[in-house]
Amino acid sequence: MRSENKGPPAVAAVDGMVRRFVRSFPVTGAAVSTLGDVLGVQTVAATDRVAARMDEIQFDLGEGPCWDAFRLRRPVLLSDLRRDLGGAWPIFAEAAWTEGVCALFAFPLLVGPFDVGAVDLYSRRPRTLAADQAQKAATFADATARQILHDALESSRSGGDTYTEDNRPYSRKIIHQATGMVLAQLGISAEDARLVIQAHAFANDRSMMEVARDVLERRIDFSAPEPG
């Protein structure tokens, strides 16, 4: 499967690693994301649109399998979303099912005490990863985490910006920019401004990226009165 991801050499290296998950396991697609404050919340590489979309939904909601794998530092294996996800994250489950995702496996990206992010593997069919497959996927995730952290440290030493938002193929920088505009429009805190964008996206069944783009292009102005 050809990846949609393009970026600087270090990102391209991770792109090759994420495609290895699809070649090695019975899954349809995969995405690698950084999470937390150190490297930010971003999709670094994805094999297809749906894989990237699974990340985007979880980023917007602030919850989901990748967040649990990251926070709990252990894999989250969901072989049948209809059965396994019903009561955990109902909004994410419904969105994933709408995208045709039937199974999802999330592995944390760890390097010793450092929590780097997570990798999501999805399947369009309900399926189970055998114990040896899950262990192998965890080993792949460890290698991916080391690659990301190594690239970030090398970039920092050289004064580059390999993993800054400007260089990431699925950058969410526009959400930060839109948050600043909403902050100015409504005179509220940055946290509340982001919440306004999130709530508007949820109420209109859109992604935060789409709403942020409309804010930046002035198609949405929260300070303007609603028609009628």
Image (cartoon, rainbow, N blue to C red):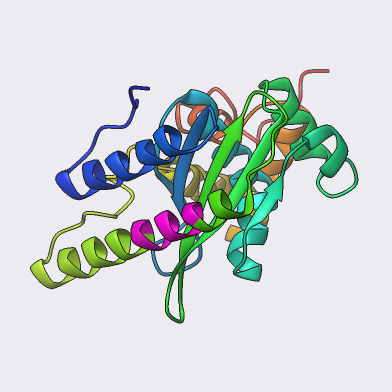
Coordinates of residue 28 in the picture (x, y in percent): 53, 27
The quarter in which the C terminus is drawn is top right
The image shows residue 221 at horizontal and vertical percentages of 60, 32
Please identify the dominant SS of the magenta region.
helix
Please say if 91 is above or below 28: below
The residue most toward the bottom is: 113
The spot of residue 113 in percent (x, y) is: 46, 81
Figure label count: 0
Determine which quarter of the picture holds residue 197.
top right
Q: Quadrant of residue 169?
A: top left
State the image coordinates of residue 127 (x, y, percent, origin top left): 69, 34
Residue beneath the point at 44% across and 34% down:
22
**Extent of the magenta region:** 136-144
Residue at horizontal 58%, vertical 59%? 190
Q: Is residue 143 visible?
A: yes
Compared with residue 23, is residue 146 higher up or lower down, i.e. above or below? below
At x 59% / y 50%, what residue is drawn?
A: 106
Residue 45 lies within the magenta run: no
Pick the front one: 218 or 132: 132
The quadrant in which residue 157 appears is bottom left
Of the pair 3 and 6, the residue shown nearer to us: 3
**Along the horizontal axis of the image, is 184 left or right of 58?**
left
